[in-house]
């Protein structure tokens, strides 16, 4: 396949086995290597080791060798799609795809959740700090703001008395 054909039809695959793999991966909305990992786990009953991942990656993508278990798994996926029983959003298909679980919540819902969390945090923190401050300084004289404590009121009358004494003393700076 030449360069221009690839540009016109990027999903076209000349090898029918590779086309089968690409089609199954597209149906599940995952990458081909993730499909390989799922097929390996389905066939062998365990996840691949790092050495096996490297060997199978080279075999599949560099030497174009499609393992039989991958062909079998891809056929199973395509057969499920043909019967209408394939749920491409099932978590089992996306267990190697970390971004899939993070993107389940829409951006609008995520922003709303962050905004609500911030508002609740600020209001809750303010209430906690107010409770702590009131316990340190004293109880408010009224339920509504501004919050004056008995100490504040006693201090303001003393300050007013001191200010009145200074003004009433008759000393004027010239």
Image (tube, rainbow, N blue to C red):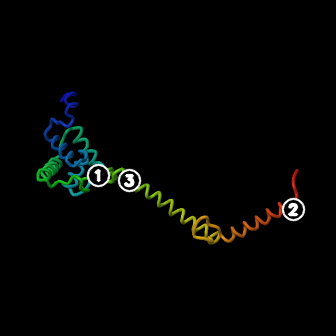
Marks 3/2: CA distance?
66 Å
> How packed is label 3: few (under 14 Cα within 10 Å), some, or many (20 or more)?
few
Q: Secondary structure at mark 2?
A: loop
**In the image, which is nearer the foreground, mark 3 or mark 2?**
2
Q: Which residue is mark 2?
A: 169
**Label 1: how many residues lie within 10 Å, few (<14), some (14-19) or many (20+)?**
some
Which residue is labeled 1 in the image?
Answer: 96
Estimate the x, y position of residue 159 in percent, counting from the top left: 76, 64
Rendered position, 150 above or below 8 = below
Residue 110, numbered circle: 3
Residues at discs 1 and 2 in contact (Cβ within 8 Å): no
Say whether marks 1 and 3 touch (CB < 8 Å). no
Mark 1 or mark 3: which is in front? Answer: 3
Q: Position of residue 6 (x, y in %)?
A: 21, 31
List x then y, in percent, for residue 66: 17, 43
Reading the chain from its start, which is encountered first: label 1 or label 2? 1
Q: Quadrant of residue 13?
A: top left
């Amino acid at each position: 396949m030449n360069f221009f054909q690839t540009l016109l039809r990027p999903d076209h695959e000349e090898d029918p086995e590779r086309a089968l793999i690409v089609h199954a991966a597209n149906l599940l909305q995952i990458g081909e290597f993730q499909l390989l990992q799922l097929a390996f786990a389905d066939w062998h009953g365990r996840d691949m080791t790092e050495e096996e991942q490297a060997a199978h990656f080279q075999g599949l993508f560099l030497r174009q060798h499609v393992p039989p278990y991958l062909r079998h798994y891809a056929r199973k996926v395509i057969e499920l799609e043909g019967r209408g029983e394939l749920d491409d959003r099932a978590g089992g298909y996306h267990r190697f795809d970390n971004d899939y679980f993070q993107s389940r919540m829409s951006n609008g819902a995520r922003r709303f959740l962050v905004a609500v969390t911030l508002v609740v945090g600020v209001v809750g923190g303010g209430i906690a700090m107010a409770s702590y401050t009131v316990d340190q300084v004293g109880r408010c004289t009224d339920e509504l703001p501004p919050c004056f404590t008995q100490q504040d009121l006693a201090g303001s009358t003393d300050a007013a008395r001191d200010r009145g004494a200074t003004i009433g003393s008759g000393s004027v700076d010239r």
